[in-house]
Image (cartoon, grey):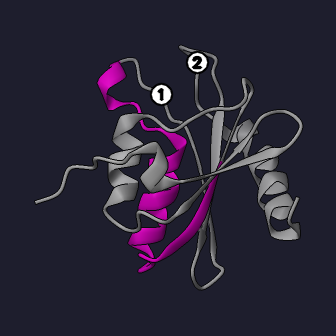
Amino acid sequence: MKQNHKKLLKIAKEVLKNSYSPYSNFKVSAVLLTEENKIFTGINIENASYGLTLCAERVAIFKAISEGYKNFKAILIYADKNPCYPCGACLQVMAEFDEDMEILLFDGKKILKKKLKDLYPFAFSI
């Protein structure tokens, strides 16, 4: 496992405790790495009105964008039940930025590496 990936996994495990998931009890964290090597974290945030729930991946991406970062190298997704693939909404948000972004998924033993374009080959675009 690459040293950089180990660092992302360690951070993902640390922030998982911040997940707000009282309805599903399914905790997810995400660690986003920008081209500038800046790290942004996200956790899933549930709501009693389920449509208002946000996935960890989008939280991390929106934090990065709000700070002026839009070039992403990789995102590591970590959950209690591994591997945890990103949902369609998160894939579509990621597709706005870089189809070659690396999606890293921890399966409990090792990190699986995927490319966004392989997980979401037909992203919506205008």
Residue highlighted by disc 2: 22
Q: Can you name the residue that lies furthest to the bottom here?
A: 36
Local secondary structure at mark 1: loop
Residue occupying the point 51% across, 48% down: 57
Q: Quadrant of the N terminus?
A: bottom right
To which quarter of the image does residue 66 belong?
A: bottom left
Residue occupying the point 36% across, 48% down: 121
To which quarter of the image does residue 108 belong?
A: top right
Residue highlighted by disc 1: 46
Amino acid type of the residue that numbered disc 1 sits on in the rendered structure? Glu
Q: CA distance from mark 2 to mark 1?
A: 7 Å
Indicate whether 96 appears above or below 35.
above
Q: Is residue 124 left or right of residue 20?
A: left
Location of residue 71 in the rendering, given as x and y in whole percent from the top left corner:
46, 77
Location of residue 100 in the rendering, given as x and y in whole percent from the top left corner:
48, 66
Indicate whether 74 appears above or below 77.
below
Location of residue 84 in the rendering, given as x and y in whole percent from the top left corner:
63, 32
Amino acid type of the residue that numbered disc 2 sits on in the rendered structure? Pro
Indicate whether 5 appears above or below 106.
below
Report if residue 52 lies within the magenta region.
yes
Residue occupying the point 36% across, 20% down: 50
Circle 1 packing at 10 Å, graded few (<14), some (14-19), many (20+), is: many
Question: Dots 2 and 1: beta carbons under 8 Å?
Answer: yes
Q: Nearer the viewer, residue 44 or 22?
A: 44
Q: Is residue 49 left or right of residue 16?
A: left
Q: How many marks?
A: 2
**Start and end of the magenta stretch?**
49-76
Location of residue 106 in the rendering, given as x and y in whole percent from the top left corner:
76, 41
Local secondary structure at mark 2: loop
Indicate whether 14 appears above or below 107.
below
Circle 2 packing at 10 Å, graded few (<14), some (14-19), many (20+), is: few
